[in-house]
Amino acid sequence: MTEGTASELDERVLGRRWTVRLDAAGRGSAAVRVSCSRPSCAEQRLPSAAAGRTAAVAHLKSHLRVLSSPRADAYCACRAEGCHTHLPDTGRHARVEPWRCGGPVVLAVVTDREGRWWQAMECCSRCAAATPGAKTVATSQAPEAAERPTPATTGAAAPRFSDHQVATGPAPVFRSAPARRRPPQAKIAQRVIPHDLRPVTLRDELIELGDLFRAYKQRTEPDLALLADLQERKARAFTTWADVTCDGALRWEAQRAEQAAAATRLQHQQRTGGVTGGDGPAVARLLTVPAQWDHARSVLAHVADHSPLPGPEARLLVLMLTLRTAHTGTGNLVGQDIAALGLTDPEDLLEKLTGCGWLTLPGTAGDLLASRPENPTPITVPSLVPHDKAGPFTFGKKMRPKLSGWAQKVISDKKLRKAKATAATRLLALTLATHSDAAGHLGPGGQGIALTAFAAWVPVEFGELLHLADQLTQADWLTDAALTDTHLTGQLAERVLPLTCPLRA
């Protein structure tokens, strides 16, 4: 480079540059401070980082509003730092020029990704384009335009920049590149629906289905019946689409939609038991799936075969203790849990269970009955503690509290408590809840429950069974109850259907 060229370049004005920073005000505080590299700008303190960022951006914009347009004779402010654009060539074809700038001088704004500092600088358009994240907010005027006189400002004096330079040009504003607009495309299942697809009715159906599936994803609560209908419509539409275009992938997608519709429909039936109550909503059961219903019946059957004491009161107490300890053989109990069972002499039953070794308590039966929720009594049923092999039940620890909560809901039913139902009546209510169909009809297929089975589930005399059924009828638990020589028939009231565990068809 000749001396004349270097002299001309040295005469150019260094581009202006200033930085607005956001820093923590001190340890142990959320406060931040905003500082500016311009000497006349005072430091600001704000209570939070969000408020600090807002103030920093506002401060930067205030500078830009009063700053004159970039100077056409300025060289890049970033040159002093040896930025990527200004690094000298070291290859065989290295240039003679000390920098590789080009284009008009612009005012660019750069910020870091974390939002901790914002920097404005004058540089050439090539440097601005090479700087990651830089946005051009103003461009210098051509020499001819710069030489034209500008009309005088009337009224108040022209705004001044923080270094007291007079602003002679229009206030720069942030400009972002206009978004590239693309023609809207109708989609379904990530597939673009061709605008020329025929017949038109098929295209309209696909567009509507796409909108319905997207709307379903925005729902806060699932509707399995609606989802199954949508999947069935999708299967039919994709089959027709495959026939029109001879696309095997569309036919495979239609088969997947058919499978999804069948699986969703089955899941809906499992959750509702197949009962919709006519035009009303489906039954929302406390135990939602058949596997949970089977587990409930397995606990009742286990207690019927392994109860250490005779009688319905002992059977109900053993059942509830089994549900509390079914997974590990241990659990917690309070006196209120025992009082809710309606037992005649709960302390005597607890002493008999501990006396025969079926139940282990850290204290006496009286201590258990006096315990409160803030200080429950730990209990152990040794026969349910798993040793070398698994226990008598196949469900896990998350299922146990669901089953226990379901049984507690049944025996603590408000109308049963109001009628002061006996333990035998509550035990019968549990039994009927697990031996009815989806509509609440007693027995498999609604044919009733054989009396021979009641001897194991509810240990009462034949004559007393009719009295218990009458108590359930008065408590609005059972309707149309009839006792024959062989079966108990009837139907559970609609209000207790959510507590039922329907038999498999």
Image (cartoon, grey):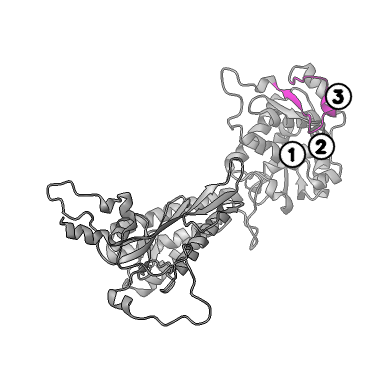
User: In the displayed structure, would residue 53 be above or below residue 140?
Assistant: above
The residue positioned farthest toward the left in the image shown: 92
Rendered image: mark on residue 501? none
| Pick the front one: 438 or 391 | 391
Residue on which the image places disc 2: 340
| Pick the front one: 294 or 49 | 49
Q: Is residue 13 left or right of residue 281?
A: left
Quarter of the rendering occupied by the N terminus: bottom left
Q: Visible in this render: residue 144?
A: yes
Are the residues at dot 2 and dot 1 in contact (C-beta closer than 8 Å)?
yes
| Residue 56 in picture, x, y percent from top left | 51, 57
Query: Which portion, as a residue range, is magenta?
Result: 359-381
Identify which amino acid the numbered label 1 is placed on.
Gln
Identify which amino acid the numbered label 2 is placed on.
Ala
Rendered image: mark on residue 408? 1
Residue at x 84%, y 24% (from the top left corner): 367
Q: Find residue 383 and report its image quarter.
A: top right
Identify which amino acid the numbered label 3 is placed on.
Gly
| Pick the front one: 440 or 27 | 27
Residue on which the image places disc 3: 366
